[in-house]
Amino acid sequence: MIMERLTADERLTLKTGAFGAVFLVSNAEPGMLAMVRESIAASGAFGAASGVVKEALTTGPLPELPRDSALEIEAIVLPALSRSVVILRAKSPGDVEVYRSVVLAAADQVAQAHHGVTAAEAAVLERIRVALAEPV
């Protein structure tokens, strides 16, 4: 299978979705100490990525996300997750599941990092799962 190289914009979309998912879960139950633990948990999951997904998540600039409201962040992150699946399906189909797994693992590890998964975190995790599902 020939894999097409991702453009800088496509890599940024994958990174926005992945880092944004972690940010959404982290902000579901805010707290400074918890945020530090959660960041460490997420970086481990991203580091375990491979191929195109690892390249997208570990190179280039960090995504810029709004900091004012969870709804604004979701309005950027959830579509980025869905677009990432579409991009990978077109350019590197074998990496779709890698991306899904890495994002869900990172988000889940963030939720688990501080006293287990709360109801708010579980709700965010479900929205992330839906955004990563196959487009209809």
Image (cartoon, helix red, strand yellow):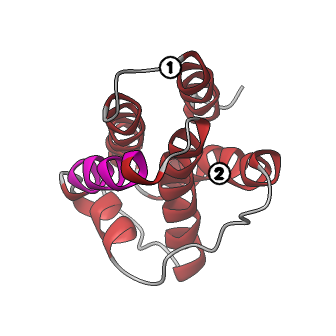
Residue 118 is marked as 1
Residue at 58% over, 33% down: 128
Q: Which residues are magenta?
A: 34-46
Q: Position of residue 115 (x, y in %)?
A: 34, 25
Question: What amino acid type should be assigned to the residue bearing mark 1?
Answer: Thr
Q: What element does badge 1 sit on?
A: loop
Q: Where does label 2 land, which residue?
A: 83
- Measuring from the top left, give residue 55's x and y in whole percent: 31, 70
Going by the numbered disc 2, the residue's amino acid type is Arg
Q: Which secondary structure dominates the residues rendered in magenta?
A: helix
> Which residue is depicted at the point 73% across and 46% down?
74
Please provide percent x and percent y for residue 68: 79, 61
- 114 horizontally vs 13: left or right: left
Look at 65% across and 51% down and name the residue there: 83
User: Which residue is depicted at the point 18% across and 51% down?
Assistant: 48
Q: Quadrant of the C terminus?
A: top right
Q: Nearer the viewer, mark 1 or mark 2?
A: 1
Q: Earlier in the sequence, mark 1 or mark 2?
A: 2
Asked if residue 130 is among those painted magenta in the image, a careful observer would answer: no
Front residue of 14/124: it is 124
Q: Position of residue 13 (x, y in %)?
A: 59, 64
The image quarter in which residue 92 lies: bottom left
Regarding mark 2 in the picture, which secondary structure is present there? helix
- Residues at badges 1 and 2 in contact (C-beta under 8 Å)? no
Using the numbered discs, state the Cα–Cα distance from disc 1 to disc 2 in whole angstroms: 28 Å
Assess disc 2: are there few (<14), some (14-19) or many (≥20) residues with their C-alpha within 10 Å of its C-alpha: some
